Amino acid sequence: MKLEFAHRGSAGIPIPYIIETNEVETNVLDFLIFRKRNSKLIHDKLRNASAQTIQNDSQRVKYLINLLAEQQYIDHENKPVIGVHYSEATYENNMEPIIELLRHRDWKEESIQQYVKTWRNFYRFLTAVGVDHSMFMPDTVESTFAQDQDENLLSHTSYAENYIGEKETAINEKNLEFKDDYVDSIISMSDFWRIYEHLYTVDEVYAVMAFIEFSTLLRVSALVRDFPLKQTKLNPNFEPYGVAVRDNQRIQDLFYIAKGGKKKVTKLSISAQKIFNDEYINSEICSYEQRWKKYQDNYCKTKWAKKKNRTKQMRFCWLNKNGTPVSVREYQAALEGAAKELGIDIHSHMLRHTGATQLLWRYIKEHNLTASHTNELLIADAHIILQGLLGHKNIETTKMYVKTIERMIRSEKLSMLLNSALSISRKHHDDLLKDNETLYAGLSAMERAVNRFEEHMTGSDIITRVKRA
């Protein structure tokens, strides 16, 4: 038995159906409904799931069931059989080999842990509602966890204070990575602009989305769902670029829905808005109005639009050059494709962590401070800055960013991170090119982005001072 999901309506719960029979898989559907509305009936430590967690859980359960459908075993007549139903699967014979398979595929133990947690909750649900099954996983261990997991790269629930939770025993704790910095979770500015330029040649929308993610520190889901074209219910006081310029509004609040459904705020600079306006809305290649017309004339006639109940009256901020609303997965695929093409290692959180590190570095640089996670005054100031943008409460997260800068200085990576693409004049740019041939590609697009980025990060009006050759 294999599963697929249909996404219908606004309830936020995908409908699972069995591919072979086209029937609804009611146990999986009920599990997702319980996760959204009655999670404590599954386990007393479980909170009701956000829409994003529901999507994650649905994909993880599907992944398990579909892998079980491919497993082979020998039946009582000594004949090979393919496919094990989830109700007949056991931990030792079926789930444990799947966990080992994921390790063989070079999955990180942290990722495996998230999948196993969902699988455990699915079987807990089956037990709670009286569905017979043969899955008996090793017991978890109750443990106290540190406050605020929001900035943990692989966390899926944010907490404001220390809490009692479960330690997953079905994975190998020795394989879990201990992280107290983000050194491996940021990219150099040279690599960022290479990715920007590559995305620009594919479709300007992906390049501008990458820059907005980088400059606002938004998560990808919030970037796709909440970044506004104009005033919205979530951002009723939002000023589009032209209005912001008229009102001399150099920075404005940008509200978004964070993990767990909480409303949070970050900052949107006029420089970031200018890139959004010039490179996307008024793009010389394919303007937003051209994309909007394709959305109305072409996309709205497709079965995909009808399936998602999308009409010509709906306005989506991010449209690709075919007029199709950009999804989270489409943007991530474009980003990953560009990185792979360029030979750059990247994951979905890297732009966010890179932007936060850049912002903190420039604060340290402009105030002539020394990066040290033991400097209490620096940590206090940095925490105020990052808390307002990232939305986290745990000061340990701020210390991780400071440690990142400390360690990059020690490892001589910082000059590559900050200086390889941040030219402030054509002469400076030409000097940099002598040592970095990769910057030759897409000179004009990169210069535009570099200049606007410099203005955003320092507050200087460099756009009016830099003369292009």
Image (spheres, rainbow, N blue to C red):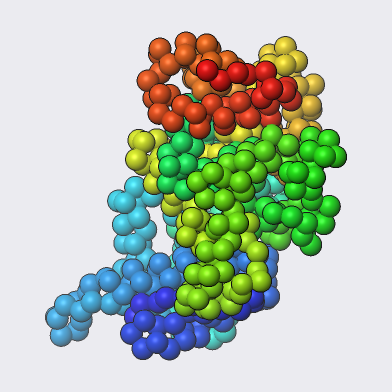
> Residue 394 or 100: which is nearer the viewer?
394
At a point 31% along the width and 75% down the height, the residue shown is 69
Using the image, determine if residue 141 lies above or below residue 79.
above
Q: Quadrant of residue 284?
A: top right
- Give the quadrant of the N terminus: bottom left
The number of callouts visible is 0
Which percent across, then down, holds residue 327? 53, 60
Using the image, determine if residue 142 lies above or below residue 136.
above
At a point 43% along the width and 42% down the height, the residue shown is 201
Using the image, determine if residue 70 lies above or below residue 374.
below
At a point 63% along the width and 66% down the height, the residue shown is 51
Q: Quadrant of residue 17?
A: bottom left
- Residue 320 in sight in this render: yes
Would residue 52 appear left or right of 169 to someone viewing this image? right
Residue at far left of view: 78
Which percent across, then down, holds residue 355? 61, 34
Using the image, determine if residue 18 lies above or below residue 331.
below
> Residue 366 or 115: which is nearer the viewer?
366
- Residue 399 in sight in this render: no
Which percent across, then down, holds residue 291? 55, 58
Which percent across, then down, holds residue 312? 61, 72
Would residue 49 appear left or right of 86 to someone viewing this image? right
